[in-house]
Amino acid sequence: MTSLLIITSVEDLQDEINKQVKDRSAYPGIYISLNKTQKSSEENLIKNNIKTDKIFFIDCVTAEKTKEDVLHILPNDLDKLSFAINTFVKDIKGKKYLVIDALSTLLIYNSENKVAAFVKKITEYTSNNDVEVIAFSPKTKGEELLNKIFNFFDKVIKK
Amino acid sequence: MKGKKNFGKINSNLKIGEKAQKIKFSDTFKTYVLKSLQSDIFPSSPNPLHKSAGFGDKKRVYNWVRPIVALFIFLIFLVFIINLYNQNNKISLYAIKEQDEGTFNLKVEIPETYKNIVLGKPVVFTAKVLNLANDKRVDVTLKYYVIDSKENVIFTKSETLAVETQASFVREVKLAQDTSIGDYTIKAEIIYNEMEEAESQDSFKITKDNKSRIEIIVIAVIIAAIIFFILIFSLSKIKYFIEKIELKARIGKIVKKKMKGDI
Protein backbone atom coordinates (compact mmCIF):
# COMPACT_ATOMS: atom_id res chain seq x y z
CA MET A 1 0.00 0.00 0.00
CA THR A 2 1.12 3.55 -0.65
CA SER A 3 1.12 6.70 1.35
CA LEU A 4 0.39 9.96 -0.32
CA LEU A 5 0.90 13.55 0.75
CA ILE A 6 -1.01 16.14 -1.21
CA ILE A 7 -0.05 19.78 -0.78
CA THR A 8 -2.57 22.11 -2.24
CA SER A 9 -4.02 25.58 -1.80
CA VAL A 10 -6.58 26.21 0.91
CA GLU A 11 -9.25 26.92 -1.74
CA ASP A 12 -8.74 23.63 -3.53
CA LEU A 13 -8.26 21.52 -0.40
CA GLN A 14 -11.86 20.30 -0.02
CA ASP A 15 -12.22 19.51 -3.73
CA GLU A 16 -9.05 17.50 -3.63
CA ILE A 17 -10.26 15.60 -0.54
CA ASN A 18 -13.59 14.86 -2.23
CA LYS A 19 -11.81 13.60 -5.30
CA GLN A 20 -9.49 11.29 -3.39
CA VAL A 21 -12.32 9.89 -1.22
CA LYS A 22 -14.55 9.37 -4.25
CA ASP A 23 -11.78 7.40 -5.97
CA ARG A 24 -11.69 5.06 -3.00
CA SER A 25 -15.40 4.90 -2.13
CA ALA A 26 -15.51 1.20 -3.01
CA TYR A 27 -13.80 0.25 0.20
CA PRO A 28 -14.00 1.46 3.78
CA GLY A 29 -12.03 4.46 4.99
CA ILE A 30 -11.08 6.35 8.13
CA TYR A 31 -11.58 10.06 7.91
CA ILE A 32 -9.75 12.28 10.38
CA SER A 33 -11.29 15.71 10.21
CA LEU A 34 -8.91 18.35 11.52
CA ASN A 35 -9.96 21.17 9.29
CA LYS A 36 -13.77 20.95 9.52
CA THR A 37 -16.27 19.33 11.81
CA GLN A 38 -17.35 15.78 11.03
CA LYS A 39 -20.81 17.08 10.21
CA SER A 40 -19.52 19.67 7.75
CA SER A 41 -17.11 17.22 6.15
CA GLU A 42 -19.80 14.53 5.76
CA GLU A 43 -22.27 17.02 4.29
CA ASN A 44 -19.66 18.12 1.86
CA LEU A 45 -19.00 14.56 0.76
CA ILE A 46 -22.69 13.77 0.43
CA LYS A 47 -23.13 16.97 -1.60
CA ASN A 48 -20.55 15.58 -3.99
CA ASN A 49 -22.38 12.25 -4.27
CA ILE A 50 -19.90 10.36 -2.17
CA LYS A 51 -21.24 7.56 -0.01
CA THR A 52 -20.24 7.98 3.61
CA ASP A 53 -21.69 4.78 5.03
CA LYS A 54 -18.29 3.08 4.90
CA ILE A 55 -16.42 6.07 6.25
CA PHE A 56 -15.40 6.09 9.91
CA PHE A 57 -15.10 9.63 11.13
CA ILE A 58 -12.77 10.85 13.84
CA ASP A 59 -13.75 14.41 14.66
CA CYS A 60 -10.87 16.44 16.07
CA VAL A 61 -12.62 19.78 15.83
CA THR A 62 -15.64 19.34 18.09
CA ALA A 63 -15.51 17.67 21.44
CA GLU A 64 -19.26 17.11 21.79
CA LYS A 65 -20.67 13.76 20.90
CA THR A 66 -23.08 14.29 18.00
CA LYS A 67 -23.46 10.85 16.51
CA GLU A 68 -23.03 7.40 17.96
CA ASP A 69 -20.69 6.22 15.19
CA VAL A 70 -18.38 9.23 15.35
CA LEU A 71 -15.35 9.48 17.60
CA HIS A 72 -14.34 12.77 19.10
CA ILE A 73 -10.69 13.09 19.99
CA LEU A 74 -8.94 16.30 20.90
CA PRO A 75 -6.17 17.26 18.42
CA ASN A 76 -3.63 17.66 21.20
CA ASP A 77 -4.06 14.00 22.25
CA LEU A 78 -1.98 12.47 19.48
CA ASP A 79 -1.43 9.29 21.45
CA LYS A 80 -5.15 8.65 21.70
CA LEU A 81 -5.61 9.59 18.06
CA SER A 82 -2.91 7.19 17.02
CA PHE A 83 -4.49 4.47 19.18
CA ALA A 84 -7.91 5.05 17.61
CA ILE A 85 -6.43 4.85 14.07
CA ASN A 86 -4.62 1.62 14.93
CA THR A 87 -7.78 0.11 16.42
CA PHE A 88 -9.82 1.04 13.37
CA VAL A 89 -7.13 -0.40 11.13
CA LYS A 90 -7.18 -3.63 13.11
CA ASP A 91 -10.95 -3.91 13.26
CA ILE A 92 -11.69 -3.07 9.63
CA LYS A 93 -10.88 -6.10 7.55
CA GLY A 94 -9.54 -5.96 4.03
CA LYS A 95 -8.41 -3.00 2.00
CA LYS A 96 -8.97 0.42 3.54
CA TYR A 97 -7.76 3.96 3.39
CA LEU A 98 -7.00 6.78 5.82
CA VAL A 99 -7.64 10.42 5.10
CA ILE A 100 -6.07 13.15 7.20
CA ASP A 101 -7.31 16.55 6.17
CA ALA A 102 -4.90 19.34 6.88
CA LEU A 103 -1.98 17.88 8.76
CA SER A 104 -0.77 21.38 9.46
CA THR A 105 -3.75 21.95 11.78
CA LEU A 106 -2.08 19.65 14.26
CA LEU A 107 0.68 22.26 14.59
CA ILE A 108 -1.77 24.55 16.34
CA TYR A 109 -2.00 22.12 19.26
CA ASN A 110 1.31 20.24 19.10
CA SER A 111 4.96 20.87 18.44
CA GLU A 112 6.45 20.18 15.01
CA ASN A 113 8.46 17.27 16.29
CA LYS A 114 5.45 15.68 17.94
CA VAL A 115 3.41 15.97 14.76
CA ALA A 116 6.30 14.58 12.74
CA ALA A 117 6.62 11.65 15.14
CA PHE A 118 2.87 11.04 14.91
CA VAL A 119 2.97 11.05 11.10
CA LYS A 120 5.92 8.66 11.10
CA LYS A 121 4.13 6.30 13.45
CA ILE A 122 0.94 6.31 11.38
CA THR A 123 2.67 5.82 8.02
CA GLU A 124 4.78 2.97 9.41
CA TYR A 125 1.80 1.19 10.95
CA THR A 126 -0.50 1.61 7.96
CA SER A 127 2.11 0.42 5.44
CA ASN A 128 2.29 -2.87 7.33
CA ASN A 129 -1.49 -3.29 7.56
CA ASP A 130 -2.91 -2.93 4.05
CA VAL A 131 -3.90 0.73 4.47
CA GLU A 132 -3.57 3.51 1.97
CA VAL A 133 -2.78 6.85 3.56
CA ILE A 134 -3.78 10.14 1.98
CA ALA A 135 -2.69 13.19 3.94
CA PHE A 136 -3.47 16.77 2.96
CA SER A 137 -1.85 20.03 3.81
CA PRO A 138 -2.47 23.59 2.64
CA LYS A 139 0.43 25.10 0.73
CA THR A 140 1.02 28.10 2.93
CA LYS A 141 0.96 26.45 6.29
CA GLY A 142 3.58 24.40 8.11
CA GLU A 143 6.37 24.42 5.57
CA GLU A 144 8.86 23.41 8.22
CA LEU A 145 6.71 20.45 9.16
CA LEU A 146 6.26 19.45 5.56
CA ASN A 147 10.03 19.46 5.15
CA LYS A 148 10.27 17.09 8.11
CA ILE A 149 7.58 14.64 7.04
CA PHE A 150 8.26 14.47 3.28
CA ASN A 151 10.33 11.37 3.63
CA PHE A 152 7.66 9.38 5.51
CA PHE A 153 5.37 9.30 2.48
CA ASP A 154 5.81 7.21 -0.65
CA LYS A 155 4.53 10.00 -2.83
CA VAL A 156 4.22 13.77 -2.46
CA ILE A 157 2.00 15.75 -4.81
CA LYS A 158 2.24 19.54 -4.91
CA LYS A 159 -0.59 21.29 -6.64
CA MET B 1 83.47 55.80 155.69
CA LYS B 2 86.84 54.56 156.90
CA GLY B 3 85.25 51.40 158.15
CA LYS B 4 83.76 50.82 154.66
CA LYS B 5 87.12 51.20 153.03
CA ASN B 6 88.68 48.72 155.47
CA PHE B 7 85.96 46.22 154.69
CA GLY B 8 86.79 46.66 151.04
CA LYS B 9 90.35 45.86 151.67
CA ILE B 10 89.46 42.86 153.72
CA ASN B 11 87.13 41.62 150.87
CA SER B 12 89.82 42.03 148.27
CA ASN B 13 92.17 40.14 150.51
CA LEU B 14 89.65 37.36 150.83
CA LYS B 15 89.21 37.08 147.00
CA ILE B 16 92.88 36.67 146.50
CA GLY B 17 92.80 33.94 149.13
CA GLU B 18 89.93 32.12 147.36
CA LYS B 19 91.79 32.17 144.07
CA ALA B 20 94.78 30.65 145.73
CA GLN B 21 92.63 28.02 147.32
CA LYS B 22 90.95 27.18 143.93
CA ILE B 23 94.33 26.74 142.26
CA LYS B 24 95.34 24.48 145.00
CA PHE B 25 92.12 22.50 144.74
CA SER B 26 92.33 22.01 140.94
CA ASP B 27 95.85 20.76 141.18
CA THR B 28 94.83 18.34 143.88
CA PHE B 29 91.82 17.12 141.75
CA LYS B 30 94.00 16.59 138.70
CA THR B 31 96.45 14.67 140.73
CA TYR B 32 93.64 12.56 142.15
CA VAL B 33 92.08 11.78 138.69
CA LEU B 34 95.38 10.94 137.11
CA LYS B 35 96.25 8.74 140.03
CA SER B 36 92.95 6.96 139.81
CA LEU B 37 93.31 6.46 136.06
CA GLN B 38 96.78 5.20 136.47
CA SER B 39 95.80 2.67 139.04
CA ASP B 40 92.43 1.54 137.50
CA ILE B 41 92.92 1.70 133.74
CA PHE B 42 96.63 1.50 133.22
CA PRO B 43 97.85 -0.35 136.28
CA SER B 44 101.13 -1.34 134.68
CA SER B 45 102.00 2.06 133.29
CA PRO B 46 104.13 4.39 135.37
CA ASN B 47 102.60 7.38 137.03
CA PRO B 48 102.31 10.09 134.37
CA LEU B 49 102.85 12.69 137.02
CA HIS B 50 106.32 11.35 137.52
CA LYS B 51 107.22 12.26 134.00
CA SER B 52 105.20 15.43 133.45
CA ALA B 53 102.39 17.38 134.98
CA GLY B 54 99.80 16.99 131.76
CA PHE B 55 98.78 14.31 129.19
CA GLY B 56 101.98 14.36 127.24
CA ASP B 57 101.96 10.63 126.36
CA LYS B 58 99.55 10.31 123.33
CA LYS B 59 99.90 6.57 122.88
CA ARG B 60 98.45 5.94 126.31
CA VAL B 61 95.46 8.25 125.65
CA TYR B 62 94.49 6.36 122.42
CA ASN B 63 94.44 3.13 124.30
CA TRP B 64 91.43 4.09 126.42
CA VAL B 65 89.57 6.10 123.68
CA ARG B 66 89.47 3.16 121.25
CA PRO B 67 86.98 0.98 123.17
CA ILE B 68 84.72 3.99 123.68
CA VAL B 69 84.69 4.67 119.93
CA ALA B 70 84.04 0.97 119.29
CA LEU B 71 81.20 1.05 121.78
CA PHE B 72 79.83 4.16 120.11
CA ILE B 73 79.96 2.56 116.63
CA PHE B 74 78.30 -0.56 117.99
CA LEU B 75 75.52 1.56 119.47
CA ILE B 76 75.00 3.36 116.12
CA PHE B 77 74.89 0.00 114.33
CA LEU B 78 72.38 -1.25 116.87
CA VAL B 79 70.16 1.78 116.36
CA PHE B 80 70.40 1.32 112.58
CA ILE B 81 69.41 -2.37 112.85
CA ILE B 82 66.46 -1.50 115.08
CA ASN B 83 65.31 1.19 112.67
CA LEU B 84 65.61 -1.18 109.73
CA TYR B 85 63.57 -3.78 111.53
CA ASN B 86 60.92 -1.22 112.39
CA GLN B 87 60.73 -0.03 108.79
CA ASN B 88 60.25 -3.59 107.51
CA ASN B 89 57.62 -4.09 110.10
CA LYS B 90 55.82 -0.92 108.96
CA ILE B 91 55.83 -2.00 105.25
CA SER B 92 54.43 -5.43 105.96
CA LEU B 93 51.82 -3.92 108.24
CA TYR B 94 50.86 -1.43 105.53
CA ALA B 95 50.57 -4.22 102.97
CA ILE B 96 48.43 -6.27 105.28
CA LYS B 97 46.28 -3.26 105.99
CA GLU B 98 45.90 -2.58 102.26
CA GLN B 99 45.00 -6.17 101.59
CA ASP B 100 42.44 -5.99 104.30
CA GLU B 101 40.89 -2.95 102.61
CA GLY B 102 40.79 -4.71 99.18
CA THR B 103 43.37 -5.99 96.78
CA PHE B 104 41.62 -4.41 93.79
CA ASN B 105 40.92 -0.94 92.66
CA LEU B 106 38.15 -0.10 90.16
CA LYS B 107 37.33 3.03 88.24
CA VAL B 108 34.26 3.38 86.04
CA GLU B 109 34.15 6.28 83.64
CA ILE B 110 31.59 7.34 81.04
CA PRO B 111 33.18 9.36 78.21
CA GLU B 112 31.88 12.92 77.77
CA THR B 113 30.22 12.01 74.48
CA TYR B 114 28.07 9.46 76.29
CA LYS B 115 27.15 11.64 79.27
CA ASN B 116 24.02 12.78 77.44
CA ILE B 117 22.56 10.07 75.28
CA VAL B 118 19.47 9.98 73.18
CA LEU B 119 16.74 7.54 74.14
CA GLY B 120 17.35 4.22 72.43
CA LYS B 121 21.07 4.79 71.94
CA PRO B 122 23.56 2.68 73.96
CA VAL B 123 25.72 4.10 76.75
CA VAL B 124 29.41 3.22 76.71
CA PHE B 125 31.66 3.17 79.77
CA THR B 126 35.21 2.17 80.58
CA ALA B 127 36.16 0.08 83.61
CA LYS B 128 39.78 0.12 84.80
CA VAL B 129 40.64 -2.69 87.20
CA LEU B 130 43.87 -2.55 89.22
CA ASN B 131 45.24 -5.64 90.99
CA LEU B 132 47.04 -4.14 93.98
CA ALA B 133 48.42 -7.49 95.15
CA ASN B 134 50.12 -7.62 91.78
CA ASP B 135 51.36 -11.18 92.20
CA LYS B 136 49.42 -13.40 89.79
CA ARG B 137 46.69 -13.51 87.19
CA VAL B 138 43.30 -13.95 88.83
CA ASP B 139 39.73 -14.25 87.67
CA VAL B 140 37.42 -11.61 89.08
CA THR B 141 33.76 -10.89 88.51
CA LEU B 142 32.82 -7.50 87.18
CA LYS B 143 29.24 -6.75 88.02
CA TYR B 144 27.66 -3.60 86.66
CA TYR B 145 24.19 -2.22 86.84
CA VAL B 146 22.24 0.86 85.87
CA ILE B 147 20.23 2.65 88.52
CA ASP B 148 17.64 5.34 87.92
CA SER B 149 17.12 8.44 90.06
CA LYS B 150 14.73 6.49 92.31
CA GLU B 151 17.42 3.87 93.04
CA ASN B 152 15.65 1.24 90.90
CA VAL B 153 18.00 -1.16 89.18
CA ILE B 154 16.93 -1.22 85.55
CA PHE B 155 19.86 -3.14 84.10
CA THR B 156 22.34 -5.61 85.52
CA LYS B 157 25.08 -7.78 84.10
CA SER B 158 28.09 -9.62 85.41
CA GLU B 159 31.06 -11.18 83.71
CA THR B 160 34.31 -12.85 84.61
CA LEU B 161 37.53 -11.06 83.79
CA ALA B 162 41.15 -12.16 84.07
CA VAL B 163 43.30 -9.48 85.71
CA GLU B 164 47.04 -9.65 86.30
CA THR B 165 48.25 -6.18 87.19
CA GLN B 166 45.69 -3.95 85.55
CA ALA B 167 43.09 -4.18 82.84
CA SER B 168 40.79 -1.77 81.04
CA PHE B 169 37.49 -2.73 79.52
CA VAL B 170 34.99 -0.90 77.38
CA ARG B 171 31.42 -2.03 77.79
CA GLU B 172 28.18 -1.00 76.13
CA VAL B 173 24.81 -0.96 77.82
CA LYS B 174 21.70 -0.75 75.72
CA LEU B 175 18.66 0.15 77.73
CA ALA B 176 15.11 -0.75 76.81
CA GLN B 177 13.20 1.52 74.43
CA ASP B 178 10.62 2.28 77.09
CA THR B 179 13.25 3.69 79.48
CA SER B 180 12.14 7.05 80.75
CA ILE B 181 14.10 10.25 80.24
CA GLY B 182 16.23 11.35 83.22
CA ASP B 183 19.42 10.85 85.21
CA TYR B 184 21.00 7.41 85.62
CA THR B 185 24.02 5.94 87.32
CA ILE B 186 26.23 3.08 86.22
CA LYS B 187 27.60 1.25 89.24
CA ALA B 188 30.23 -1.43 88.92
CA GLU B 189 31.88 -3.67 91.49
CA ILE B 190 34.69 -6.19 91.50
CA ILE B 191 33.97 -9.44 93.26
CA TYR B 192 36.85 -11.72 94.16
CA ASN B 193 36.56 -14.82 96.28
CA GLU B 194 32.89 -14.01 96.79
CA MET B 195 33.77 -10.69 98.38
CA GLU B 196 33.22 -7.23 97.03
CA GLU B 197 36.69 -5.82 96.58
CA ALA B 198 36.02 -2.48 94.94
CA GLU B 199 33.27 -0.41 93.44
CA SER B 200 32.93 2.67 91.33
CA GLN B 201 30.21 4.64 89.60
CA ASP B 202 29.51 7.35 87.07
CA SER B 203 26.34 9.02 85.91
CA PHE B 204 24.71 9.89 82.61
CA LYS B 205 21.53 11.42 81.26
CA ILE B 206 18.95 10.13 78.79
CA THR B 207 17.41 12.86 76.66
CA LYS B 208 14.81 13.15 73.92
CA ASP B 209 15.99 12.95 70.35
CA ASN B 210 14.51 16.10 68.86
CA LYS B 211 16.78 15.91 65.84
CA SER B 212 15.72 12.42 64.88
CA ARG B 213 12.07 13.36 65.40
CA ILE B 214 12.44 16.19 62.88
CA GLU B 215 14.25 13.85 60.53
CA ILE B 216 11.44 11.32 60.85
CA ILE B 217 8.85 14.02 60.10
CA VAL B 218 10.83 15.21 57.07
CA ILE B 219 11.23 11.64 55.79
CA ALA B 220 7.54 10.93 56.41
CA VAL B 221 6.55 14.07 54.48
CA ILE B 222 8.85 13.13 51.59
CA ILE B 223 7.48 9.57 51.51
CA ALA B 224 3.91 10.89 51.67
CA ALA B 225 4.65 13.29 48.81
CA ILE B 226 6.20 10.47 46.74
CA ILE B 227 3.20 8.21 47.41
CA PHE B 228 0.86 11.09 46.55
CA PHE B 229 2.60 11.74 43.22
CA ILE B 230 2.77 8.03 42.43
CA LEU B 231 -0.95 7.76 43.13
CA ILE B 232 -1.75 10.76 40.94
CA PHE B 233 0.51 9.43 38.18
CA SER B 234 -0.98 5.96 38.55
CA LEU B 235 -4.51 7.36 38.55
CA SER B 236 -3.87 9.34 35.39
CA LYS B 237 -2.28 6.26 33.81
CA ILE B 238 -5.14 4.06 34.96
CA LYS B 239 -7.64 6.64 33.72
CA TYR B 240 -5.88 6.75 30.36
CA PHE B 241 -5.77 2.97 30.20
CA ILE B 242 -9.52 2.74 30.96
CA GLU B 243 -10.22 5.40 28.33
CA LYS B 244 -8.28 3.38 25.78
CA ILE B 245 -10.24 0.23 26.62
CA GLU B 246 -13.49 2.17 26.30
CA LEU B 247 -12.31 3.66 23.00
CA LYS B 248 -11.36 0.25 21.68
CA ALA B 249 -14.75 -1.17 22.62
CA ARG B 250 -16.52 1.76 21.02
CA ILE B 251 -14.50 1.49 17.79
CA GLY B 252 -15.28 -2.20 17.75
CA LYS B 253 -18.99 -1.41 18.02
CA ILE B 254 -18.83 1.29 15.31
CA VAL B 255 -16.95 -0.97 12.93
CA LYS B 256 -19.38 -3.82 13.59
CA LYS B 257 -22.38 -1.58 13.01
CA LYS B 258 -21.10 -0.01 9.81
CA MET B 259 -19.56 -3.14 8.33
CA LYS B 260 -22.54 -5.38 9.06
CA GLY B 261 -23.09 -6.23 5.46
CA ASP B 262 -19.41 -6.84 4.66
CA ILE B 263 -18.60 -9.10 7.65
Image (spheres, coloured by chain):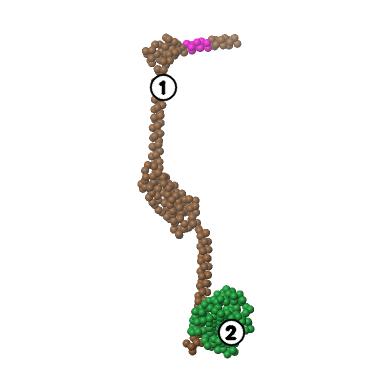
Visual hue assigned to chain A: green
The residue at the point 48 percent across, 58 percent down is: B119
Q: Main secondary structure of the magenta part?
A: helix
Q: Secondary structure at mark 1?
A: helix
Could you give the CA–CA distance between mark 2 and mark 1, rounded to whole angstroms?
Answer: 154 Å
Q: Does residue B225 appear in this view?
A: yes
In percent of the image, x 39 and y 34: which residue is there? B88
Q: Nearer the viewer, residue B3 or A50?
A: A50
Can residue B260 be found in the magenta stretch? no
Q: Amino acid at mark 1?
A: Val
> Above or below — where is B203 with respect to B2?
below
Quadrant that contains the C terminus of chain A: bottom right
Front position among marks 2 and 1: 2
Palette colour of chain B: brown
**Quarter of image, res B6:** top right
- Circle 2 Cα neighbour tier, 10 Å, few/some/many (<14 / 14–19 / ≥20): many
| Residues packed near mark 1 inside 10 Å, few (<14), some (14 to 19) or many (20 plus) | few
Question: Which residue matches tag 2?
Answer: A17
- Is disc 2 placed on a helix, strand or loop? helix
> In the image, is residue A7 above or below residue B225?
below
Q: Chain of mark 2?
A: A
Query: How many numbered callouts?
Result: 2
Per the rendering, the mark at residue B69 is 1
Subunit ID for the residue under disc 1: B
Specify whether disc 2 shares its chain with disc 1: no
Amino acid type, label 2: Ile
x then y, percent, for residue A5: 57, 80
Q: Position of residue B11 (x, y in %)?
A: 54, 11
* Percent x, y of residue B25: 46, 12
Residue range (magenta)? B15-24
